[in-house]
Amino acid sequence: MRLRVIRTAAAMTFGAVLAGAAACSAPSDGKGGAGGGTGGSLVVGIAQEPDTLSPLLGYGKDGNSKIFDGLLRHDADMELEPALAAELPEIGDGGRTYTYTLREGVTFSDGTPFDAEDVVFTYETILDEKTNNPSKGELDALDSVTAKDEDTVVFRLKYPYAPFAERTVLPIASKEAAAGQDVNTGPYNTEPVGTGPYVLTGWSRGEKLTFEANPDYWGGAPEVEKLTMAVIKDDDVRATRLRSGDLDAAVLPPALADTFAGDDGRRVVRARTADFRAVTLPTAGPVTGDRAVRRALDTAVDRRAIVDSVLGGAGRAAYGPVPTDSPWFAEGTERRHDPRKAKEILEDAGWKAGEDGVRRRDGRRAAFTLWYPSGDRLRQEHALAYASDAKEIGIDITVESGTWEVIEPRMKDDAVLSGGGSPADPDFDLYPLLHSSLALDGFNNMAAYDNPDVDRALEEGRRTNDRAARAEAYATVQRELAENPGYTFLTHIDHVYVMDDAWQGVTTQVEPHDHGLGAGPWWNVEDWRPKK
């Protein structure tokens, strides 16, 4: 059977999406921007930089890595199309084999030819137990990958895994450049060699990454010849640098982006995403470990008010990782804002109001700490709104900010204003977020959620190609989350950008949570042309 078209369910309903961030370089006169679309350069700022630029350790796993290509890639409508593969895969053996014929004449940026051995090397290295790739579980279904010949690769799966083709947007590394060194610490992590439209020319940690167009790119040399991604974690600083002319583009909170709406020569773009904001409620916590507390908080929060006040309408209420406008969303799992019901839940569970207005049970105050990453205005405002709604029902939440280095060791006991979301397939979000086997595994399952019914449904959903069976499995997960929440999901946010209007060919894609370096209006920057 040939896979003619693979279109993600989320893409069918979300429409096109943007995401990204802003950057800095030498200041201009404040009128034309940093690159201003002239001289074939673009300066973009990103809120966070990657830990590595090696796909063997997880870089670019969802596509748009700029330095690399996958066998497949997404177009503007999030449909899969060939990249390093010459065509979409042949699927056989009841969905257990995927055969890819490779594009001919492709070379890596160092001039070495690309072939099937590079594909085998990439996937086998990722799955090697010695490789510290935090996302290797996403390839759990893969049993083996073999080079049938230099232009043909065959993947064999342990079980039919419906979204496997989506996993082959994963970037392909150069075997010649990356083999023979420590995969976790070797130079390939900071000096990558790929087949993509851009070549890394410099990386100053915490400051910027610089790229130049690959003149031998198989898709044609990009007209944006120089690309700079500057690391600017603070939203307000990005806005200031954009206004001063240091930047050509920036991702900004809606309120900040709106201040640029009347500027000549700039565009403000809002785009829907699969990007959610949620509060982790650790099941090991003395307060959040009580299911009644989690249910009360889930009922007390005013999601609509957060969308209106914090996001300025640029988003939607969230009741789980699956957006309400996705065909995978389980109707009837919406939770109405009802503080009175929330108080009843707490009362019935023995949490009684104290003289200070904070509830207590067995001498313990209903109080805990909620962290958010410093400099992230949207998460801060989400956290403060959540704490305000919690206070109304007698729960005292202390909101704190810190770096991820400060936050991560506290995740077992403290709540975190978290984010995530992938538009590709529900398995990509639900499994790592909720399966008990991944509890506190890095940033997977940050709430240490443990629900056997959810585990079973997640396993059923990823092990069948039957869409109806998958839909029922993921509906089960969403219904369980409504009854036994491990998180309070708040919003799905729209990504809002301000960018100089100097290029044509700028389009959008459905955007995941991770954005900036590869995703954003510049997801297809290699195809842009200057406006005449």
Image: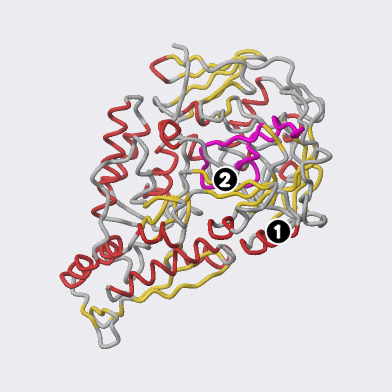
Q: Label 1, label 2: how many angstroms apart (C-alpha)?
A: 16 Å
Residue 439 in the image: state x and y as whole percent.
41, 53
Find disc 2 in the rendering and name its residue.
269
Quick one: label 1, few (<14), some, or many (20+) residues within 10 Å? some
Residue at (45, 33) in percent of width and height:
11
Q: Is residue 530 magenta?
A: yes
Q: How many marks?
A: 2
Tell which of 334 and 67 is nearer to you. 334
Picture quadrant where residue 278 is located: bottom left
The amino acid type found where label 2 is placed reads: Val
Tell which of 255 and 194 is nearer to you. 255
Tell which of 130 and 288 is nearer to you. 288
Residue 200 in the image: state x and y as whole percent.
77, 41
Q: Which residues are magenta?
A: 505-532
Residue 172 in the image: state x and y as whole percent.
65, 30
Residue 382 higher or lower than 503, as above or below: below
